[in-house]
Image (cartoon, helix red, strand yellow):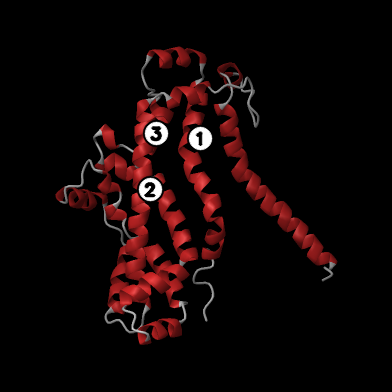
Amino acid sequence: MIMTRGQKIFNACNIVFLGAIGLSMVLPLIHIIAQSLSNSVAINAGEVSFWPVGFTFGSYKLILQDPSIWLGFRNSVIITVFGTLINLIMTSSLAYPLSRPEYLYRKFVLILILITLVFSAPLIPNYLLVKQLGLLDTLWALMLPMAISAFNLFVMRSFFMNLPGELIDSAKIDGCGEFRIFWKIVLPLSKPALATMGIIYAVAHWNRYAEAVFYISDRQWIPLQVRLREIVFTDQYGQSDVTSELLVMLSPEGIKMAVIVVATLPIMLVYPFLQKHFIQGMLVGSIKS
């Protein structure tokens, strides 16, 4: 296919525009990584841009020797993994019956869910509920109250509605029950939607901060993001002889940048493995049969 001159100009402008947007997102991250790998003299002199100056792993050595970093990392991994599993199970289990026209009262339930999407509960009632359930100072407080997102539920329901009804009807004729249909047929066909919802839920859990501040007072259970905030805003580092020696040679800005990289890298490494399904899932609900 031969493109016209106007199409070539449009494609060129589109590439430049999208490239500029991509650079605006990537360059700050490159700058953070460069600062985290630079020495204090270069950082304090403002010599670091997008390449490390005075290359050193001192900032990473400092934060990785802090036991509270590993404790927060462990808690964040637990919250992200189990919280995302709970989200996917609860969201898909509720979205499927709401997508089937034969189930009674589905419209009434959808209206109730829509109300929660428009009018969210205030902080104090949420806190009192978590307290009465005995979830304070537990990781469950950061997973169970957020088990279902109303927005993600509607997206998942839209995907289920696009599945061929004849496939489900034929399964019922063959003697499959509702649970078996859901587990053996619906979920395997819903991998793009599940991958998309999984990434959205996982990122939300990994970045969980406000709820941790409100519900967690025991430092044994604080997630990594709370520890990150303490380092970035209050310069609270782990205390040890090695730490004291490193602090003299390192810049506080470099340490903060290293903590940001450590807190961001794990969730970034997950995306490439789910990229294919994520791109497919972005079209969920956009095409109606």
Q: Is residue 226 visible?
A: no
Spatial separation of the CA atoms under disc 3 and disc 2: 18 Å
Q: Is residue 198 above or below residue 174?
A: above
Q: Residue furthest front?
A: 174
For residue 80, the mark is 2
User: Which label is found at residue 53?
Assistant: none
Q: Residues within 10 Å of mark 3 (few under 14, many from 20)?
A: some
Foreground mark, 3 or 2?
Answer: 2
- Residue at 17% over, 51% down: 133
Numbered disc 3: secondary structure? helix
Asked if one can make out residue 140 in the rendered structure from this viewpoint, the answer is: yes
Q: Residues within 10 Å of mark 2 (few under 14, many from 20)?
A: many
- x and y percent of residue 170 in the render? 41, 85
Left or right? Give the position of 4 relative to 32: right
To which quarter of the image does residue 49 belong? top right
Q: Which mark sits nearer the N-terminus, 3 or 2?
A: 2
User: For the image shown, how many numbered marks are present on the structure?
Assistant: 3
Q: Is residue 263 left or right of residue 176?
A: right
- Residue at 48 percent across and 12 percent down: it is 248
Q: Mark 1 — residue?
A: 261
Q: Amino acid at mark 2?
A: Thr
Outermost residue to the bottom:
173
Q: CA distance from mark 1 to mark 3?
A: 13 Å
Under circle 2, the secondary element is: helix
Disc 3: which residue:
229
Question: What is the three-letter code of the residue carrying label 3?
Answer: Arg
Q: Which callout, 1 or 2, points to the residue nearer the camera? A: 2
Q: Is residue 142 above or below residue 261?
A: below
